[in-house]
Amino acid sequence: MKINVVEHPLIKHKLTLMRRKDTGPKEFRELLKEITLLIAYEATRHIEIFETEIETPLEKTKGYFINDKDVVIIPILRAGLGMSDGILQLLPNASVGHIGIYRDPKTLEAVEYYAKFPKITENSIVFVLDPMLATGVSSVKALDILKKNGAKNIILVTLIASPEGTEKINKEHPDVIIYTASLDQKLNSKGYILPGLGDAGDRLFRTK
Ligand code: URA
């Protein structure tokens, strides 16, 4: 199974706070933003940098800037929205698109209900955000749509992944690199991740 689990004491600590059922929406949102930033530190390790010359108060020297203008961030609605600020804090010049997908209750197929993307080229580094990689059905659909729109270099950033969802992405989109804070045990019969943290969207937006 190909997945990058970002191991760090701060991530473990913050994720434990997020999992607790008594953690309220304010803390949950702040923690999701903070963990996303910490995962993004690893997930952006290979983004392009360019050399530049600057002047310190003492002399001229060589420096480096990141090229975040070719970065595209795509939160999957709605829970992915809780991750965009964390990554944008590190990549402030990235452009942002949105994709909305729901699961048809009859056919169980993933259906696109919204998609708006900035310009995507073969040089774009596309970070797809979805906190819970559960069955993988919506992420696969999002990746299909993004590839149809020209995305070639895609990194999927999740907070918690299931083995089932990870296998699905590895099988259907083997070129996509996955970063997560935790690979959990399994899915339950309703498609929730165990032990997980419940419904991330509901906990972010207090809809239950
Ligand atoms: N979506 C969630 O928000 N939580 C899960 O456990 C699975 C899917």
Image (cartoon, rainbow, N blue to C red):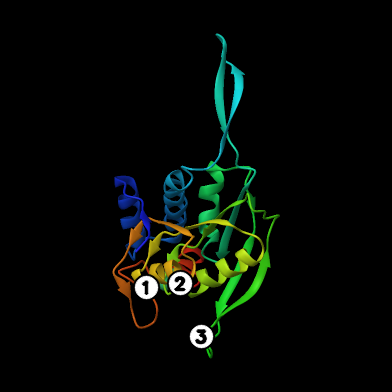
Q: Position of residue 158 (x, y in %)?
A: 44, 59
Mark 1 or mark 3, which is nearer the start of the sequence? Answer: 3
Badge 3 marks a residue whose secondary structure is loop
Q: Nearer the viewer, residue 91 or 35?
A: 91
Q: Residue furthest top?
A: 58
Quarter holding the N terminus? bottom left
Mark 1 or mark 2, which is nearer the start of the sequence? Answer: 2
Relative to 175, is 10 on the left or the right?
Answer: left
From mark 2 to mark 3, how far is it between C-alphas?
A: 12 Å
Mark 3 or mark 2, which is nearer the start of the sequence? Answer: 3
The residue tagged 1 is: 164
The residue depicted at 62 percent of the width and 47 percent of the height is 94
Q: Within the displayed image, which quadrant is ligand 1 positioned in?
A: bottom left
Q: Is mark 3 within 8 Å of ligand 1?
A: no
Q: Position of residue 66 (x, y in %)?
A: 57, 36
Q: Position of residue 26 (x, y in %)?
A: 46, 56
Relative to 116, is 169 on the left or the right?
Answer: left
The residue tagged 3 is: 108
The residue tagged 2 is: 136
Relative to 34, is 117 on the left or the right?
Answer: right
Q: Residues within 10 Å of mark 3 (few under 14, many from 20)?
A: few
Q: Position of residue 13 (x, y in %)?
A: 30, 50
Residue type pointed to by label 1: Glu
Q: Residues within 10 Å of mark 1 (few under 14, many from 20)?
A: some
Relative to 168, is 52 on the left or the right?
Answer: right
Badge 2 marks a residue whose secondary structure is loop
